[in-house]
Image (cartoon, rainbow, N blue to C red):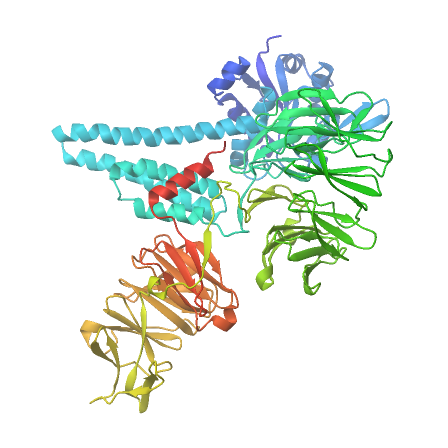
């Protein structure tokens, strides 16, 4: 039937409820349906909403006008608050609407209170043959700032009314807003270009005004990029930076410096740090399953659906409805399919991972059952037959069955099958024997006696090594060759090079063992809940531990480099192609950058270790020179390279230094704690640190300080000078930045405490600092003061005074040079065009 009204709005006639009803009515009646949805649904616009203006009469029935309006309304929207269940008229409106046969067309809108106190009982309970069943209605939630909440929640209401997926509608709304923004910027730029010609005939002022508009758009995008990056959304940070770059090309290179800074802030995340999260509105997910290319992730949901998200953009791509609670799901090794099965049953389903389309729903041949929830590399299904205890591989496309000769299972519950994540190797076990199989040709690589069962750790179905329980020890074999590499009392996982074994200590923590000597190297970790430890190596030096929380440890210096923390307990993790996905028990999911050999198109900092580094390739822009002479009755000198004590006799009190073969005299304000001075690259400025104060000198203005920078209550530890900027390091966790001409403090930059060394790059665009306390060097972009890279410093306490930091001559490499001659180098992109290319590659979701 055709309806006069899209919705009837039921509400109590109380001030808050009236305002909410008006706001919902206004939001629905003014909503413009996107063109593609109008074409898809045939609905050009929503009809009017019915909202009664007066109190209902004091009668027992609703009245003919209300009943007629309910009959002519397709949907019933109920404004829910703790006051609603006490309104007999609202409840009667709901009862009447249900009597019309439209119970599934009721949409609750929560404006205050909790759902259990605010929803009408008619939509929270259902009578069945087994009794009353509790329901969880799909509702909109506009508690708090109603106008702000309605911007999103109106889409949830409209999605139900148009029979659309909420996330699809939200995505279209966001894309439409982005297109409008881009169209606006494009129009502005087009207007600027158009009027440039016109300005030749009219006046120069008009051109300048139009250019100013385009400049404002570019600067706004740069600001949005910085804000998104600071909030932890690196993808949006890169997208806004790309838009700023594209829009700024009419100004040639004028905006290249701030745009480069915006890119650098987002494109060099520290390994193991969080790089994003799913845009899932805080949905509570189950255990994750990540595709081997790292770009897709699925979760088991309590509503029996299987949502699929893109890990680059964080967007939900689609959801497979009615997937089932007891079915197993996994991506195929080539990431093209999602495989659904239940071990021990013949049925299976294949879906396209691109859009969730069902490709095949079938069963394996009669008498056979699916024996493992993973596919092989060529997408065959492992199956077994109880009757003759046979094992085979079934091709779901050709329907061919390939018997695995030489394997005879028990035919009972002790039969187990493990398929490696890459799909090239597998293992079949009958509780007594284990057969390792090359799945590419179906041949048995090795047969051993043992079992796969382990109460504390799952069987290793990824990584380089396979583990089983032998007669008196855990045995580790290489997946590729089936070669035995270790027997140990510990059941755990091996590092990629096989030199370390990480084993969970029940629910207490983990143990790191040297596989060569059997020595326990480290026992650490903790467990905040009664959960079994899950462990995985990301590389030879990086261990991920899951136990309610997730921690990431760097083993070389026994340091925890990341923790989700108590407020972010997880449901475990999955790791592939440089991504670590962790669903949180409180809702949502975090994505961290992990070490990986694959080119996963992720933004990352490139770190290189270089032996026998040439010190001449390390540029020191700020020189630190010793002082000699007499001041306040004390004599100062220094030792030269040969160990000789050098002193200078001056005609008058003062401290002298030599810069580029020219001598200079300084007269400090008061006493001298450390007889050396920091010199700018051109020799114009000098800074002498006196405990927590700093005397600033200018070479052309004589030996007296031009100003003294007052104390900040922390001892000043080091300084760097470039141009008219002075950066001071201290025991505090911030660097202080001063204008040398005015002495004004321009602000502070975040870095580690106890900063004892720092250097500018030769072009002054970056600064590198060293924190002995945080055991790392930090690279900062001086345009936006953003930390863009961190370089770990091993044994920082012992090398703090002997290592050197700085940049390469071209400024594209940040260098930490150790006293033994090797260097750790952080590699920056050579130019803006390279940054743009990498950003476009990363933000391309496909």
709 and 578: which one is in front? Answer: 578
Which quadrant is the N terminus positioned in?
A: top right
Using the rendered view, name the quadrant where residue 826 is placed: bottom left
Tell me, yes or no, if residue 21 can be seen here.
no
The relative height of residue 726 versus residue 69 in the rendered view (above or below) is below
| Number of numbered discs on residues | 0
Tell me, yes or no, if residue 605 can be seen here.
yes
Residue 363 on image: x %, y %: 75, 21
Residue 560 on image: x %, y %: 60, 59
Question: Can you name the residue that lies furthest to the bottom here?
Answer: 633
Q: Residue at coordinates 35% horizontally, 39% vertically from top-left?
A: 244
Q: Residue at coordinates 35% horizontally, 58% vertically from top-left?
A: 808
601 and 156: which one is in front? Answer: 601
Question: Can you name the residue that lies furthest to the top here?
Answer: 1
As drawn, is 61 to the left or to the right of 180? Answer: right
Residue 773 on image: x %, y %: 51, 68
500 and 828: which one is in front? Answer: 500
Residue 746 on image: x %, y %: 34, 60
300 and 92: which one is in front? Answer: 300
């Amino acid at each position: 039937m055709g309806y006069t009204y899209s919705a009837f709005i039921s509400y109590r006639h109380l001030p808050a409820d009236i305002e909410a009803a008006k706001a919902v009515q206004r939001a629905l009646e003014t909503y413009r349906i996107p063109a593609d949805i109008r074409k898809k649904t045939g609905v050009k616009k929503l009809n009017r909403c019915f909202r009664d203006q007066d109190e209902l009469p004091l009668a027992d029935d609703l009245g003919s006008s209300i009943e007629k309006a309910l009959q002519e309304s397709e949907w019933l929207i109920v404004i829910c608050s703790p006051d609603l269940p006490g309104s007999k008229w609202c409840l009667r409106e709901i009862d009447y609407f249900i009597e019309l046969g439209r119970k599934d067309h009721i949409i609750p809108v929560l404006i205050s209170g909790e759902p259990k106190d605010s929803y009408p009982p008619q939509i929270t309970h259902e009578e069945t043959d087994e009794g009353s069943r509790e329901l969880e209605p799909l509702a909109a939630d506009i508690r708090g700032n109603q106008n702000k909440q309605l911007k999103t929640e109106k889409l949830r209401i409209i999605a139900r009314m148009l029979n659309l997926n909420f996330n699809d509608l939200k995505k279209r709304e966001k894309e439409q807003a982005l297109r409008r923004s881009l169209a606006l910027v494009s129009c502005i730029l087009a207007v600027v270009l158009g009027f440039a010609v016109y300005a030749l005939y009219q006046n120069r002022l008009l051109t300048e005004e139009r250019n100013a508009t385009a400049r404002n758009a570019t600067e706004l995008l740069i600001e949005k990029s910085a804000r998104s990056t600071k909030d932890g959304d690196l993808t949006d940070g890169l997208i806004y930076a790309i838009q700023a770059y594209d829009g700024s090309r009419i100004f040639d290179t004028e905006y290249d410096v701030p745009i480069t800074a915006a890119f650098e802030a987002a494109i060099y995340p520290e390994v193991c740090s969080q790089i994003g999260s799913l845009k899932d509105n805080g949905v509570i997910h189950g255990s994750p399953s990540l595709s081997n290319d790292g770009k897709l992730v699925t979760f088991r949901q309590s509503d029996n659906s299987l949502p699929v998200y893109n890990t680059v953009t964080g967007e939900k791509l689609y959801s497979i409805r009615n997937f089932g609670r007891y079915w197993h799901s996994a991506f195929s090794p080539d990431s093209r399919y999602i495989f659904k099965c239940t071990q021990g049953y013949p049925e299976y389903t294949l879906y396209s991972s691109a859009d969730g389309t069902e490709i095949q729903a079938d069963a394996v041949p009669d008498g056979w059952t699916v024996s493992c929830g993973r596919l092989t590399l060529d997408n065959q299904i492992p199956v077994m037959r109880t009757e003759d205890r046979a094992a085979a591989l079934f091709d779901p496309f050709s329907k061919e069955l390939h018997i695995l000769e030489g394997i005879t299972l028990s035919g009972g519950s002790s039969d187990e099958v493990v398929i490696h994540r890459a799909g090239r190797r597998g293992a079949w076990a009958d509780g007594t024997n284990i057969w390792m199989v090359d799945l590419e040709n179906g041949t048995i690589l090795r047969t051993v006696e043992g079992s796969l069962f382990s109460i504390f750790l799952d069987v290793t179905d990824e990584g380089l090594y396979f583990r089983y329980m032998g007669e008196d020890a855990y045995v580790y074999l290489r997946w590729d060759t089936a070669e035995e590499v270790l027997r140990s009392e510990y059941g755990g996982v091996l590092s990629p090079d096989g030199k370390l074994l990480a084993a969970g200590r029940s629910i207490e923590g983990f143990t790191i063992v040297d596989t060569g000597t059997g020595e326990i190297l480290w026992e650490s970790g903790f467990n905040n809940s009664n959960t079994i430890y899950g462990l995985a190596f990301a590389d030879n030096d990086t261990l991920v531990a899951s136990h309610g929380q997730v921690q990431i440890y760097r083993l070389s210096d026994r340091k925890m480099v990341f923790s989700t923390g108590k407020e972010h307990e997880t449901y475990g993790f999955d790791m592939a192609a440089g991504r670590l996905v962790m669903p949180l028990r409180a809702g949502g999911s975090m994505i961290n950058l992990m070490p990986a050999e694959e080119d996963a198109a992720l933004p990352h900092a490139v770190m290189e270790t270089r032996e026998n580094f040439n010190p001449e390739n390390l540029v020191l822009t700020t020189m630190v020179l010793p002082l000699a002479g007499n001041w306040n009755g004390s004599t100062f000198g220094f030792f030269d390279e040969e160990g000789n004590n050098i002193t200078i006799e001056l005609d008058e009190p003062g401290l002298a230094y030599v810069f580029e073969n020219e001598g200079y005299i300084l007269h400090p304000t008061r006493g001298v704690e450390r007889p050396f001075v920091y010199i700018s690259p051109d020799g114009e400025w000098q800074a002498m640190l006196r405990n927590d104060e700093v005397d600033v000198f200018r070479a052309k203005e004589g030996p007296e300080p031009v100003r003294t920078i007052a104390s900040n209550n922390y001892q000043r530890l080091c300084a760097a000078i470039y141009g008219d900027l002075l950066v001071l390091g201290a025991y505090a966790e911030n660097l202080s930045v001063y204008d040398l001409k005015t002495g004004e403090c321009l602000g502070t930059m975040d870095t580690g405490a106890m900063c004892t060394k720092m250097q500018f790059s030769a072009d002054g665009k970056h600064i590198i600092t060293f924190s002995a306390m945080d055991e790392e060097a930090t690279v900062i972009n001086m345009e936006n003061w953003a930390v863009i890279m961190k370089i770990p410093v091993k044994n920082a306490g012992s090398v703090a005074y002997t290592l050197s930091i700085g940049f390469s001559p071209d400024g594209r490499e940040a260098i930490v040079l150790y006293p033994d001659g090797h260097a750790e180098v952080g590699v920056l992109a050579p130019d803006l065009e390279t940054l743009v290319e990498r950003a476009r590659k990363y933000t391309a979701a496909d």
